[in-house]
Image: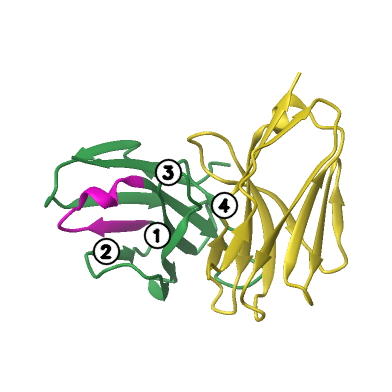
Chain colours: A yellow, B green
Amino acid sequence: RKEVEQDPGPFNVPEGATVAFNCTYSNSASQSFFWYRQDCRKEPKLLMSVYSSGNEDGRFTAQLNRASQYISLLIRDSKLSDSATYLCVVKGDDYKLSFGAGTTVTVRA
Amino acid sequence: DAGVTQSPTHLIKTRGQQVTLRCSPISGHKSVSWYQQVLGQGPQFIFQYYEKEERGRGNFPDRFSARQFPNYSSELNVNALLLGDSALYLCASSLGPGPTDTQYFGPGTRLTVL
């Protein structure tokens, strides 16, 4: 079983739409959780950390459910510039990062 | 402030050759991690170094090795290259190796093995 699993998508949404997707992780001892964004052939860039209480950064909302071991990301009012691959990332008790394979989001005009 | 830098940007090698990739962390960061990303997959952890000591190693063969220098820069070496080593190699730096230390990625080195 993979350490982090994501729905690969792609999610094709019109501008202004809301899109949400999840990932699940297998290690119940995981310490920290993140969403990174990766544009085509570029490096991953931190989008936001994910906290147990849930957190919001502008149009982006992340939720963590430790009991069910899943993390979610919701994007409101999608922009063309939100088109990217979103990587779910978990830091284990050994402090190494484990990445999902990514969820591809395409926002169309 | 400069971000994480990596060199070279692109590299083409043939099977059996050896390669050295270089990484300079963000100023003040003492931890460097290396990842391999093949097309269509997320990055896979190779090594983490902190204060010049190896702090973690992923499931990669002994052909992969790394080191960290006193200025916290790092090198990743891969010997006896295989076609399957073709990938984007990413370096990430962080203040430390702890659970709340955010990792910031460099632009990567794209390695092609022919």
Q: Nearer the viewer, mark 3 or mark 2?
A: 3
SS at badge 3: loop
The chain ID associated with circle 1 is: B
What are the residue bounds of the magenta stretch? B74-87
Identify residue for label 3: B39
Q: Nearer the viewer, residue B37 or B25?
A: B37
Quarter of the rendering containing residue B51: bottom left
SS at badge 4: strand
Decide which of tag 2 and tag 4 comes sooner along the chain. 2
Decide which of tag 4 and tag 1 comes sooner along the chain. 1
Q: Could you tell me which residue is drawn at 55 percent across and 71 percent down?
A: B97
Q: Is residue A42 above or below residue A80?
A: below
Q: Amino acid at mark 3?
A: Leu
Identify residue for label 1: B71
Q: Amino acid at mark 4?
A: Tyr
Identify residue for label 2: B64
Decide which of tag 4 and tag 3 comes sooner along the chain. 3
